[in-house]
Image: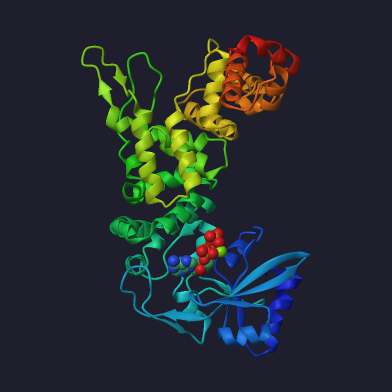
Amino acid sequence: MLQLPPYVTTFMKTFQDAGYRIYVVGGTVRGLLMNRDILDWDFTTSGTPEQIMKLFPHSFYNNSFGTVGIPIEADGKEMVFEVTTHRKEGDYSNARHPDSVEWADNVEDDLARRDFTMNAIAFDGTTITDPYNGQEAIEKKIIKAVGDANIRFQEDALRLIRAIRQAAQLGFAIEKATMASLQTHAKLIMGISGERIQGELFKLITSDNAADGVMLMKDAGLLQYILPEVDDCFGVEQKSPERHHMYDVGTHLVESLRYCPSSDVITRLATLIHDIGKKETYHKDPETQIITFYNHEVVGEKQAKDIATRLRLSKKDAQQLVMLVRQHQFTVSEEQSDKALRRFIRQIGVENIDEMLALRTGDRLGSGAKETSWRTELFKKRLIDVQNVPFSIHDLKITGHDVMEHLNIKPGPQIGKIMNALFEMVDNEKVKNEKDALLAKLPTLLQ
Ligand code: ATP
Ligand code: MG
């Protein structure tokens, strides 16, 4: 028997006492059956939104989804329970929005409009309603469309990528007929908005099985529409005589994502696309057979911008994505000067150092290299050390005021020039960033 927390049972009793039927439903029941922690509580009821709102005066109604949100105090935490009136859906005309939504008077009709059998189970606190054998699908770890997959994907093409995203999150396989239907209708994903695709793609690439999920998108024929730049990289060889690459570019990208240690979604996306410029810049020398990809990070930068636009990334996310792709070729060498390292940090931004290194770790492991090299470890240590040196004139240990006072000069452009000159000297390690040392240099800068 499924166990519900007391605050859920109490909540459901309010409906039952008022004469309505209420069920825990969808991903929530699936989570209960799989013994997962439940973060979102979703319910379906025979009561209409107006009737629900009478029972819970603090609730709020989201008209476009017909969902009533009810704030609940659960074990000292504020949660919002989402309650939707039983629905059946009318005809679909554009693979996304049903033309009409009607209330249904029984839970079976409501379950029939849900996407996958594992998501079409209801539980009223006593009895499980499972007309499509969703429990069996969960046991077998299978994602299967409710009813005819061909019809269901044509009704709503978002279901195409929902199937793959949920497979990646849960570690489930997609049932054969459902997968065949995905392949048949993959192109319909073009009718789904960038925002919605972003939502699903982000969940997919931050899931436990992100790399397998991307391969599943490829097998389903969705990758060519969602990230064609990545799809195009499969089959682009990069093996040269005496070079270490064992994978083609596409496989390397997916493997890099597999090993990327960051949980930041933009870093993970950047890792998945970092080498997309290689397709266009591929060159094989006919004599030596050596393959090169000159400036692939510059071509990749442009493609990353396209991807950011298509997926409707925020300006900040887009900038981070593009920067990570553009800079991913940074060099790690013991011969680099501290100044060069500081220039690198200035270019990527201090806040992005860890993310840039996470991309590199994915890149290395995704090429079959071992975890780390002494070079990388040394580089990481130096990246920290060189940050003790100022990055701009604002970090200098004296101010424009000190300069004016010490040299007895008036405000004017000369102050800025002197500050810049001081910064140059500190940056070049000609003087320490200490107040007395800096003041002592001032007279030499006065012209
Ligand atoms: P998660 O919350 O982990 O993303 P979920 O299965 O709960 O997974 P939601 O998007 O929260 O997914 O949707 C809740 C339920 O609504 C689903 O379990 C499913 O029954 C139904 N559902 C959601 N989107 C669709 C859709 N596009 N077509 C049909 N049913 C859907
Ligand atoms: Mg949910």
Seen in the image, is 60 located left or right of residue 107? right
* Residue nearest the observer in this picture, 199 or 35: 199
Q: Position of residue 300 (x, y in %)?
A: 36, 34
* Residue nearest the observer in this picture, 440 or 77: 440
Q: Is residue 276 visible?
A: no
- Residue situated furthest bottom in the rendering: 19
**Ligand 2 lies in quarter:** bottom right
Whether 341 is drawn above or below 270: the answer is above
- Quadrant placement of the C terminus: top right
What colouring does the structure picture have? rainbow
Numbered disc total: 0
Q: Position of residue 44 (x, y in %)?
A: 57, 77
* Residue nearest the observer in this picture, 258 or 102: 102
> Which residue is painted at 63% across and 83% down in the image?
53
Whether 336 is drawn above or below 109: the answer is above
Residue 196 occupies which quadrant of the picture?
A: bottom left
> Which residue is painted at 69% across and 17% down in the image?
407
- Quadrant placement of the N terminus: bottom right
> Which residue is painted at 67% across and 76% down in the image?
125
- Residue situated furthest right in the rendering: 76
Q: Is residue 66 visible?
A: yes
* Residue nearest the observer in this picture, 446 or 255: 446
Seen in the image, is 321 located left or right of residue 435? left
Whether 311 is drawn above or below 14: the answer is above
Q: Position of residue 304 (x, y in %)?
A: 39, 40
> Which residue is painted at 35% across and 65% down in the image?
153
